[in-house]
């Protein structure tokens, strides 16, 4: 079988080694005589998977002891609601940095629960850059930001310092580079880009925030409920968590976050060079100082060329290169599991396509 070169934005590519190991263990996990999907989430066999995934995540991200790690469901979209539901009220203000569609959705949900404020935005320039923050007001409930923007291809290069908790949606670049977890109050991420398959959401939460939870929230939507139950209050997405543990094992084998960050920079530089050397044939959407190492977005001179580019790329066994419907053009999502060779193949195709028209 020839593997397709997968540039989809999510669900996205998974490491081949992970898929092969999951295949080998699919029918009989560790001698249990059944698949990991069939194990009781209360069994000692599954508990070992659960704890292994937590321990690996803490190790790779160097998560401090005063943080909880949760495996939840509902994707980042549920976190858009669950965070203000628990930590915002009509007496408090949550501050937002607007860098794209996901921050817009997070803001819309927060408005249902309390006061909100936009302290910086790049909306008027089609979210081409990460805006500068001159000052974060003190006394707010939290500052919300999206660390990487899949649709527009922008990424925070440096996170702000402020006196209130920073809440970060890291769905599309978690584990792609080292970060200082202690700068954040809450980090949340849907798994389907760098962590594993869709179905599980990782939440990293500073313990001291639990004392600030709104008591008037349904039990299943309170973080303290899931902390007390070790993410087992209801049946968790056991297979997705198992796959997450395999991805984390693979990431550790690659040399951890410093090594993967170096590889991700190399991959991105390769594609941005193909854009910059094209004399305007390809035009990057993101401003150069805000370019993402996860999602490379670009346009061609017209829609017909774009369609031809995507069609011919598919003929070369490369898929997922269409841009988001809101801005069009093209997008190569080059998450951790996308190899250097995959990016070399795309960069070479971009050059040959440009020369052929």
Image (spheres, grey):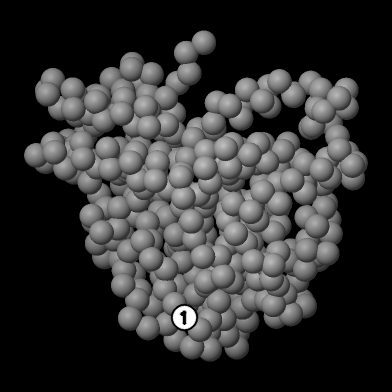
**Camera-side residue: 160 or 315?**
160
Residue 314 visible, this orientation: yes
Above or below for 181 versus 281: below
Name the residue at 55% across, 65% down: 181
**Camera-side residue: 81 or 140?**
140
Above or below for 236 versus 93: above
In the image, is 107 to the left or to the right of 51?
Answer: left
Residue that lies at the very extreme toward the top in this rendered image = 1
**Camera-side residue: 4 or 91?**
4
Name the residue at 13% across, 20% down: 356
Q: Which residue is disc 1 drawn over?
A: 162
Q: Position of residue 222 (x, y in %)?
A: 75, 67
Name the residue at 53% across, 46% down: 256
Name the residue at 45% across, 72% down: 96
Quadrant in the picture for residue 241: top right
In the image, is 139 to the left or to the right of 203?
Answer: left
Residue that lies at the very extreme toward the left in this rendered image = 279
Q: Position of residue 139 (x, y in %)?
A: 53, 89
Q: Position of residue 327 (x, y in %)?
A: 31, 47
Residue 126 visible, this orientation: no
Quadrant in the picture for residue 100: bottom left
Residue that lies at the very extreme toward the right in this rendered image = 43
Q: Quadrant of the C terminus?
A: top left
Q: Position of residue 199 (x, y in %)?
A: 66, 43
Above or below for 250 versus 288: above
Quadrant in the picture for residue 142: bottom right
């Amino acid at each position: 079988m020839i593997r397709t070169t997968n540039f989809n934005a999510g669900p996205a590519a998974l490491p081949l080694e992970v898929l092969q190991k999951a295949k080998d263990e699919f029918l009989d996990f560790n001698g249990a005589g059944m698949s990991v999907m069939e194990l009781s989430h209360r069994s000692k066999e599954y508990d070992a998977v659960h704890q292994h995934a937590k321990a690996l995540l803490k190790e790779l991200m160097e998560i401090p002891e005063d943080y909880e790690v949760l495996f939840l469901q509902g994707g980042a979209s549920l976190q858009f609601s669950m965070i203000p539901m628990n930590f915002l009220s009509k007496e408090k203000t949550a501050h937002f940095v607007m860098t794209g569609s996901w921050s817009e959705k997070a803001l819309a949900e927060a408005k249902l629960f309390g006061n909100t404020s936009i302290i910086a935005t790049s909306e008027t320039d089609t979210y081409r850059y990460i805006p500068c923050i001159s000052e974060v007001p003190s006394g707010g409930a939290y500052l919300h930001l999206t660390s990487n923007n899949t649709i527009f291809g922008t990424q925070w290069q440096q996170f702000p310092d402020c006196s209130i908790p920073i809440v970060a949606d890291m769905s599309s670049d978690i584990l792609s580079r080292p970060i200082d977890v202690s700068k954040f109050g809450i980090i949340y991420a849907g798994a389907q880009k760098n962590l594993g398959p869709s179905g599980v959401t990782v939440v990293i939460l500073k313990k001291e925030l639990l004392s600030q939870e709104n008591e008037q929230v349904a039990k299943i939507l309170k973080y303290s409920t899931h902390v007390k139950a070790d993410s087992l209050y209801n049946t968790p997405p056991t297979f997705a968590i198992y796959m997450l543990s395999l991805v984390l094992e693979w990431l550790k084998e690659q040399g951890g976050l410093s090594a993967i960050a170096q590889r991700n920079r190399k991959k991105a530089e390769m594609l941005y060079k193909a854009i910059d050397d094209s004399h305007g044939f390809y035009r990057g959407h993101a401003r150069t100082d805000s370019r993402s190492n996860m999602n490379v977005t670009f346009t061609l001179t017209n829609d017909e060329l774009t369609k031809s580019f995507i069609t011919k790329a598919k003929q070369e066994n490369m898929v997922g290169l269409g841009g988001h419907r809101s801005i069009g053009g093209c997008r190569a999502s080059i998450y951790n599991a996308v190899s250097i060779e995959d990016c070399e193949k795309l960069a070479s195709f971009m050059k040959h396509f440009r020369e052929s028209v």
